[in-house]
Image (cartoon, rainbow, N blue to C red):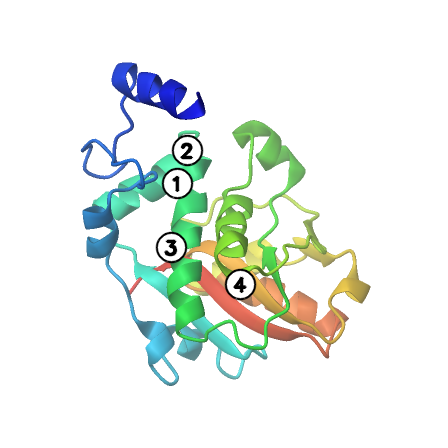
Amino acid sequence: MPSLLSDIADFFMPRTCHLCGCTLRETERIFCVRCIETLPRSLYHLMPMNPMERRFAGLVPFVRATGHFIYSRNSELAAAIHDMKYRQFPSVGKRLGEIVGEELNMAGFFDGADCIVAVPMHWWKKAKRGYNQADYIADGLGMATGLPIIKPLEAIRRHKTQTAMTLQQRLDNLAGSFHVKDPDSLHGKGVVLVDDVCTTGSTLRSLAEEIANAVPDCRLYLLSLCVTV
């Protein structure tokens, strides 16, 4: 019966790929296999001291860092990320998180990690948007890796949008924005800290500094779904 209902639903409202618009096969979700294969990977996780790690080297302690997909304006991926963040398509983030989790897990990126933590969103911004896209990315990563998702962080201060800011302006803008509300849950843990897009690295850096100060024995894995070059 569930299969019949699914077939009927697909007939009247066919599921389509969020990127190319083709009709999805029964085993495909959100994206078709062809589009998944053509997403621009950075392959940073295969490079020693990759460009993502160089953004944080000497500034915050971390085990590994990577941004999985290359983000460029006006690309299909950028449009999907925009839909994820601003057009009520959080499922896009969850599916991309799952893809990233599967690929990085096979490469050993998560070796030694104990849990996943999404970059928190201020309650006012979350109320306006309806969700935190980083939570959905973390959900996808958790599905792929089996790592538990915990929420020991909170955003305690609203900050301005950072699109046109320099790195220093972004860091100043984020100062005092985050707080570790449950440090006990992080003691001695390998924590995968997850963001959506890494441009300058200011958000991950600010959070990593906050965590390192509150829980010095925490081991950080810095991960963004996408990274600019």
- Distance Cα–Cα, label 3 vs label 1: 11 Å
**Closer to the observer: label 3 or label 2?**
3
Task: Tell me if residue 28 can be seen.
Answer: yes
**Closer to the observer: label 2 or label 4?**
2
The label on residue 99 is: 3
- Distance Cα–Cα, label 4 vs label 1: 21 Å
Q: Look at the image and tell me in which quarter the C terminus lies.
A: bottom left
Residue located beneath label 2 in the image: 89
The label on residue 204 is: 4
Could you say whether the residue bearing mark 4 is in a helix, strand or loop?
helix
The label on residue 92 is: 1
As shown in the figure, which amino acid type bears the numbered disc 4? Leu
As shown in the figure, which amino acid type bears the numbered disc 2? Phe
Of the two numbered discs 4 and 1 on the same chain, state the one appearing first in sequence. Answer: 1
Of the two numbered discs 2 and 4 on the same chain, state the one appearing first in sequence. Answer: 2
Q: From this viewpoint, which residue is outermost toward the top? A: 12
Q: Residues within 10 Å of mark 3 (few under 14, many from 20)?
A: many
Q: Residues within 10 Å of mark 1 (few under 14, many from 20)?
A: many
As shown in the figure, which amino acid type bears the numbered disc 3? Ile
- Distance Cα–Cα, label 1 vs label 2: 6 Å
